[in-house]
Image (tube, rainbow, N blue to C red):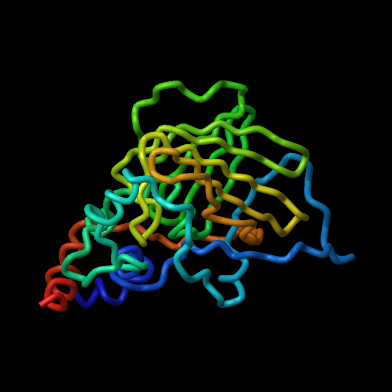
Amino acid sequence: MLTRYLNSIVGVVAALALSFGARAQTAPSKQPEVTKSKSAAPAPRRDLSGIWDVEDRMEGIAPTGVKSHAPFTAWGADIANNLYKPGDGPRRVTIGLVNDPLDSCDPAGFPRNLLFELRPFQVVQTPNQVLMLYQYQRVWRVVWTDGRELPKDPDPQWYGYSVGKWADDYTFVVETVGMDERTWLDNAGNPHSSELRVEERYHRLNRDTMELTVKIDDPKAYTEPWLGRDRIRLTLQPAKTNYMEMICAPSEAEEYKKGIANPLSK
């Protein structure tokens, strides 16, 4: 069992290995403005459909580093410094002390699935919804586009409540509230509160290229809004692309802790 787990750790429980000290995918990849080549096909109007992946990974360069953020409020600093014990970042601890919820196969939640483990995802558009289907943990989100308002006092959900609209023909803006406080923002142990509000901007540059910006606004945890992703470049994948299965299995997580993580902490 342990051998099988080790052989498949990247594809099945990548979060475990990464949260125990591998470098994060939280750093925004600051990209230069795209110069549209003559061969680049134009972007379709109001259409994000397709399978998308981080451009740097396609070139063999995965986003690395831990994103800096606005200063913590007193509440945020207390959570970050005293309660969360991450396996990466400026407050990293030894393996045996890490209490990252991903280590027990809790859902990554939103927006951690964008700030830490942004893997290929598929966008499917319907008349009143945009569906985001993520390879990592095999989950999906519903972004409502029927004109409804965000709930005023939502019950917390792992992936929140999202509404979206087109700012122009090539920019789709999503607002999300109602995230569960049990989730972390990233594997560096940056916290959030129930007041978190996230803005995603998907700006399609041409047929094959899109930029993603993610703004974090949580006045209870941070003194000002900050960018978790800043125009990270995404590339359209072939329509026949088949997702790799990336599911965290609790039984394998326990095997990892017993066989590797706990012995290394001694």
Q: From what the image shows, is residue 186 above or below residue 153?
A: below
Is 264 placed left or right of 225 in the picture? left
Along the viewing direction, whichever of 103 and 142 lies nearer the viewer: 103
Quadrant assignment for the C terminus: bottom left
* Residue drawn at point x = 40 percent, y = 50 percent: 72
Q: Residue furthest right?
A: 38
Please identify the quarter of the rendering in which residue 126 is found. top right
Q: Residue furthest front?
A: 74
Along the viewing direction, whichever of 54 and 243 lies nearer the viewer: 54
* Residue drawn at point x = 45 percent, y = 63 percent: 244
Residue 37 % position (x, y): 85, 66
Please identify the quarter of the rendering in which residue 196 is found. top left
* Residue drawn at point x = 67 percent, y = 65 percent: 31
Is 7 placed left or right of 212 in the picture? left
Along the viewing direction, whichever of 232 and 130 lies nearer the viewer: 232
Label count reads 0
Residue 130 % position (x, y): 58, 37
Q: From what the image shows, is residue 265 above or below residue 86?
A: below
Quadrant assignment for the N terminus: bottom left
Is 48 placed left or right of 200 in the picture? right
Q: From what the image shows, is residue 86 above or below residue 146?
A: below
Residue 222 % position (x, y): 43, 46
Residue 52 % position (x, y): 60, 57
Along the viewing direction, whichever of 20 and 38 lies nearer the viewer: 20
